[in-house]
Image (cartoon, rainbow, N blue to C red):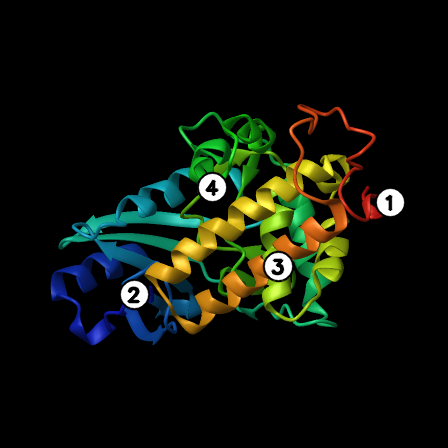
Amino acid sequence: MVIERVAWPNLDEALKDAIAAQCGPVQHVTPVGPGFNSQLAIVVHAERGSRVFIKGLRTDHARARTQRIEATINPYVHAVAPRLLWTLSAAGWDLLGFECVTGRLADYAPGSPDLPIVLECLRLLQAIPAPGLPLKRAEHRWRNYVDDPADLDHFAGNHLLHTDFNPDNILIADRAYFVDWAWPTRGAGWIDPALWALWLIAAGHTPDQAENYAAHTPSWARAPACAITTFVRANHRLWSEIAADHPDAWTVDVVDAAKRWDRYRSAKYGEVQPECPSGPALSANWPAGTGATHGA
């Protein structure tokens, strides 16, 4: 699933000239390590010390549309993400130029000082409503992984969701920044905390510990536990499919975390029941999300 990077020396001169027209004369270029979404990922150092992070795909790449998606959503996420400075289509490439944030990738390990920093950024994101754009909908993205289509109603909502909390997508600097907005989604607010919790489990947290972090978001505190359990099972099925198609070490780790979390929820709450309440109502048999007393 890792996309092979193209190095700066191997780019067409026409593309280099187009980049210089955006950034100013290029002094030197720093490559960014391997990733999952970009064929080009570099930091351009220009005159007077200015720096721009540039990511891009060839226009004929299957994922080229994600460049346009990320450019479209960026004005709405300045509170949690680096600002987009410019877009460029030249020499068969689609590029995005962002303000360059000097930071490091987030550490999700138990006890990491990054965890409260990421949580604070997640709480900021939770306050952003989904803009009036043709976003993917959570109830559509997970539609193939539930037993009862009626369960998808619990995934619907009007929150803006990032949905990809791989630590490679979280920069830690003066604060946390959420990057790689390739899959922005409209849905229930508690879905992002749930997706972050899965990565915490993959990083060594127990399901209970991961849920306690998620519980510090108000959306999780309001969510029916049965809705969370349904989503955890659906996400387990999704990651089982991903790992079967791409059996990399990291996908195997995530599907193992998803399996452990699914078993934990089933043992704690039992199998998902058809009387799981719809909307904001809570069933006496299905309390709000675990650790809800920690929510704001």
Eye-nearest disc, 3 or 4: 4
Mark 1, Cα crowd under 10 Å, few <14 / some 14-19 / many 20+, is few
* Residue 124 location, quadrant: top right
CB under 8 Å between discs 3 and 4: no
Judging by the rendered image, the residue that carries numbered circle 3 is: 176
Marked residue nearer the N-terminal end (4 or 1)? 4
Q: Amino acid at mark 4?
A: Tyr
* Left or right of residue 268, residue 193 in this image: left
CB under 8 Å between discs 2 and 1: no
Mark 3, Cα crowd under 10 Å, few <14 / some 14-19 / many 20+, is many
Could you say where residue 25 lies in the image, as x and y percent from the top left?
Answer: 27, 66
Judging by the rendered image, the residue that carries numbered circle 2 is: 3
Eye-nearest disc, 2 or 3: 2
**Residue sitting nearer the eye, 149 or 96:** 149
Q: Residue at x 70, y 63 (%)?
A: 115
Q: Residue at x 50, y 60 (%)?
A: 169
Could you tell me which secondary element the residue under label 4 belongs to? helix
Could you tell me which secondary element the residue under label 1 belongs to? helix
Judging by the rendered image, the residue that carries numbered circle 4 is: 145
Judging by the rendered image, the residue that carries numbered circle 1 is: 293
